[in-house]
Amino acid sequence: MRAVTNTVAPARVARASARANVARRSRRAIAVSPRANAAQVVAQTAIDLNEETVTAIGAAVLGLGAGLGIPIFFVWQERRDKERLEEIRELNRATLKATGEQMSPEEIAELRPSRYLDRREFKDDD
């Protein structure tokens, strides 16, 4: 009787050994460097996202930024205008006390720049 031996081609053994070495190295790299693992996850996620998803995410971020940024900007401008107006009033009081005359509307307009709502005409068309 002949003994059956399992013979595996040497090339297959070499490939299997190489795959095992790569797997061991990658496990070591993950264990050693969690940042590298996170970067790999982010890179894989970026690859998985398609163009429409990226566009939707970008539009959402821009919309949120504009939705919050514009009102904050206008509130900030109103606050600055109130401070400027108070400074002009103090200057006008000091001018009245020193010279006995108030500042002219032209002088006040030079000190306080016009705002968008200052230029509009509000009409009551009832």
Image: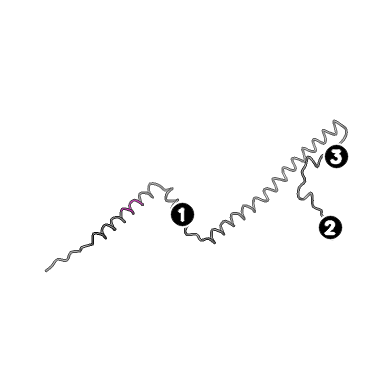
Residue hosting label 2: 124
**What main secondary structure does the magenta stretch of the protein show?**
helix
Q: Position of residue 14 (x, y in %)?
A: 26, 57
In-image side of 61 versus 83 (left or right)? left
Quarter where residue 100 is shown: top right
Count neighbours of disc 2 (C-alpha within 10 A) and say few if under 14, some if 14 to 19, many if 20 or more.
few
Quarter where residue 110 is shown: top right
In-image side of 25 versus 88 (left or right)? left
Q: Compare marks 3 and 2 and give the one earlier in the sequence.
A: 3
Q: Position of residue 82 (x, y in %)?
A: 75, 42
Q: Compare marks 2 and 1 and give the one earlier in the sequence.
A: 1
Could you tell me the amino acid type at mark 3?
Answer: Ser
What residue lies at 68% left-to-right and 50% top-to-bottom? 71
Q: Which residues are magenta?
A: 21-26
Determine whether 124 is above or below 101 in the image.
Answer: below
Q: Which mark is residue 104?
A: 3
Residue hosting label 1: 43
